Image (cartoon, helix red, strand yellow):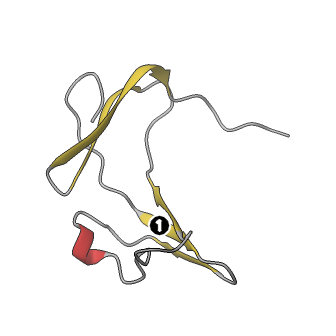
Amino acid sequence: IDANGTEYVPQGYEMKDNTKTYITFNVAVPRWRDIRRRPRRGTNDILNLIFIVPVGTRLDHLLFNSERLGFFENVIVEPPSMR
């Protein structure tokens, strides 16, 4: 959720386990149950949510599945790097 109260739904996710990386994109992921490949308990699996947010947006906090996961301090979305 940004500083103006606009909510952004993840538009995909990346799931990594010890041997593979799975990327799902252009699929709205509003709830945990919408994620087909989830991190397994007791492993080092990593899940990254993919958001599409306009440049210049000031982020406020991360809310997923109606649960506040964290806050952002002084985070403004910047244009992609041209490296």
List the single residue furthest toward the left: 66
Residue 19, x across and y down, in percent: 70, 84
Q: Nearer the viewer, residue 65 or 57?
A: 65
Q: Quadrant of residue 22?
A: bottom right
Quadrant of the frame with the C terminus: top right
Residue in the picture at 42% in, 82% down: 37
Residue position marked by numbered label 1 in the rendering: 13
Q: Residues within 10 Å of mark 1 (few under 14, many from 20)?
A: many
The mark tally for this picture is 1
The residue under the point 43% across, 41% down is 53
Q: Residue at x 47, y 23 (%)?
A: 75
Q: Nearer the viewer, residue 71 or 3?
A: 71
Q: Tell me if residue 64 comes above or below residue 83 in the rendering.
A: below
What is the residue that sits farthest to the right in this orientation? 83
Residue in the image at 60% along x and 77% along y: 17
Dot 1: what SS? Answer: strand
x and y percent of residue 66 in the render? 14, 51
Vertical arrangement, residue 37 with respect to residue 2, above or below: below
Horizontal placement of 70 versus 81: left or right?
left
Please state which of residues 78 and 66 is positioned toward the viewer in this rendering: 66
The single residue placed furthest to the top in the displayed view is 74
Q: For this view, does 46 lie left or right of residue 41?
A: right
Give the amino acid type for the residue marked by disc 1 in the picture: Tyr
Q: Is residue 2 left or right of residue 12?
A: left
Relative vertical location of residue 49 with respect to residue 80 in this rendering, above or below: below
Residue 32 appears at what percent x and percent y? 25, 69
Q: Quadrant of the N terminus?
A: top left
